[in-house]
Image: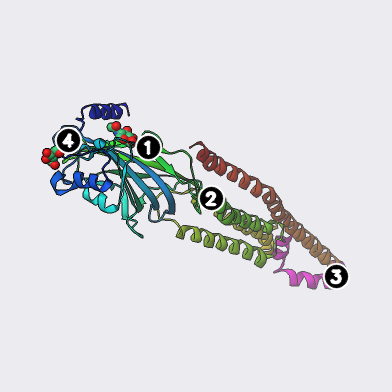
Amino acid sequence: MLFAIGLLIAHLSALPTSLAVINLTADMLDQEILDSLLGPDAKYDQRVSPMPNRNEPVIVTVDLYILALSSVDVIRMSFDADFVVRQRWLDRRLNFEKARDHGNHYIAGTPALAQSIWRSDLFFVNARDAAWHEVTRPNTLIRIFPNGTVQLNQRVKASFSCQMQLSAYPFDTQNCQIELGSFGYTNTELVFLWKPDAPFTINTAIKLPQFKLRDYIRTEIYQTAHYTGKFSYLRAYIKFDRDYEYHVTQSLMPCVFLVICSWVSFWLDSEATPARVALGVTTLLAIYTQSAAVRFSLPPVSYLKAIDIWFLICVVFIFGSLIEFALVNYFTRRSLKNPAKHVRSGSFTDLSMKQPSRASAEIDAERTADGDVKTHLTRRLTTVKKRFKKVIDEDRKKAKTIDVVSRVLFPVSFLVCILVFWCVYYVNNDDQ
Ligand SMILES: *[C@@H]1O[C@H](CO)[C@@H](O)[C@H](O)[C@H]1NC(C)=O
Ligand SMILES: *[C@@H]1O[C@H](CO)[C@@H](O)[C@H](O)[C@H]1NC(C)=O
């Protein structure tokens, strides 16, 4: 910055009062002044820069006024801006101080005047596409001050590329830039500087649908070296803060509700298989549909985004509740399916081992003490039944315990996950 000011002062002090080989007299009309400055006799050549025979660069001070911002597009990684670019430089050949004895009025010209004088070859480094506004006339303001200072304002609409980082999406902040510089003049011929006061202003009325604009605006001057020479560039930063409220209500909260829905299963009867499976599967499918909808609005980046992690948490919890049901169901049906295997008391085995000799035993019993054996067998059967019931009840109890534990375990661990997620992404984002 200091270097720039020094350059400007050195440059101004070295100026002769007037180079124009014209006769300027006091209180000439603007037309006469222009004729004498730019007419055929004046030998003004717009092809050469205002510093034709010097080793000093032309200093062009620039400021930008953003009128509108729109289409901050994460898929195309670009944003559109409608703005006025204001340039000011000194062209000693246009000095008409002699004709302005009274007052310091500038000459306001039409776009045609701008066409007839030397102008910088400013271009937007990161613009994908840009155009001047030409309705109803080219949106150009040109003023020539008596001391030869030229003020040129032009309105531009452009689409700028912006490398967006989506790893914190939807809690992300995008740092976009507008870069401008001279296309053809190296920094020994032309230097762009930001206007010292208010180099970059944004219309405060701008409202973006998904972003908030940070007040914090930064500008910088930098140079780029190519084999054709070093070029002077300017850069202005715009910070877009994503409005995460929309995403919280549209994607994050529904996901939480779906997970809570899947927990309803823990309160349902362990034998209500269709209900519990249907609940788990439908919530899982709903989550997938939800995350697909979000995925479509984002570019396929190779890294994980915050929203992916969020959906992953939800999917894991819903999947977990399905697995929990599988476990519960297994315990409920284990003893029913293969009772003998699980009844270790021996009642069943006794019975089955005795089976081959049962007929003879029965015959014996009938022969000897008919009623006795019958009561013995029924007693035995009832104990087996009782035992069996006990085993089933034990397994049922196990299943029930899994459900009861899950009722607490799932919500608590989900809450912990949410808190960790929130801390990592939201609090982190606030620090930026
Ligand atoms: C400037 O004015 C003087 C006197 O009026 C005149 O002799 C001279 O030719 C003029 N020069 C030009 C370039 O018009
Ligand atoms: C020329 O005049 C303009 C407008 O009055 C002023 O802002 C600028 O500082 C002047 N430049 C010089 C070199 O005197």
Q: CA distance from mark 1 to mark 2?
A: 36 Å
Contact between marks 3 and 2 (CB within 8 A): the answer is no
Q: What kind of element bears circle 4?
A: loop
Q: Nearer the viewer, residue 11 or 123?
A: 11
Task: Indicate whether residue 320 is drawn in magenta.
Answer: no
Q: What amino acid type is highlighted by mark number 1?
A: Thr
The kind of secondary structure element at disc 2 is: helix
Q: With 180 as the anchor, is 409 left or right in this view?
A: right
Q: Which residue is mark 1?
A: 219
- What's the CA distance linking mark 2 and mark 4? 70 Å
Q: Residue at x 69, y 60 (%)?
A: 332
Q: Residue at x 29, y 46 (%)?
A: 125
Q: Is residue 324 visible?
A: no
Distance between the Cα atoms at labels 1 and 3? 112 Å
Give the percent coordinates (x, y) of residue 138. Answer: 32, 56
Secondary structure of the residue carrying numbered label 1:
strand
Q: Which residue is mark 3?
A: 368
Tell which circle, 1 or 3, labels the residue nearer the N-terminal end: 1
Asked if residue 258 is positioned above or below residue 415 in the image, the reply reads: below
- Within 8 Å of ligand 2, the CB of disc 2? no
**Label 1 Cα crowd, 10 Å radius (few <14 / some 14-19 / many 20+):** some
Q: Nearer the viewer, mark 1 or mark 3?
A: 1
Residue located beneath label 4 in the image: 19
The answer to whether mark 2 and mark 4 are in CB contact below 8 A is: no
Q: Quadrant of residue 148?
A: top left
**Dominant SS type (magenta):** helix
How crowded is the residue under tag 3: few (<14 C-alpha within 10 Å), some, or many (20+)?
few
x%, y% of residue 95?
A: 23, 37
Q: Is 369 covered by the magenta stretch?
A: yes
Q: CA distance from mark 3 to mark 4?
A: 146 Å
Which of pointers 1 and 4 lies earlier in the amino acid sequence? 4
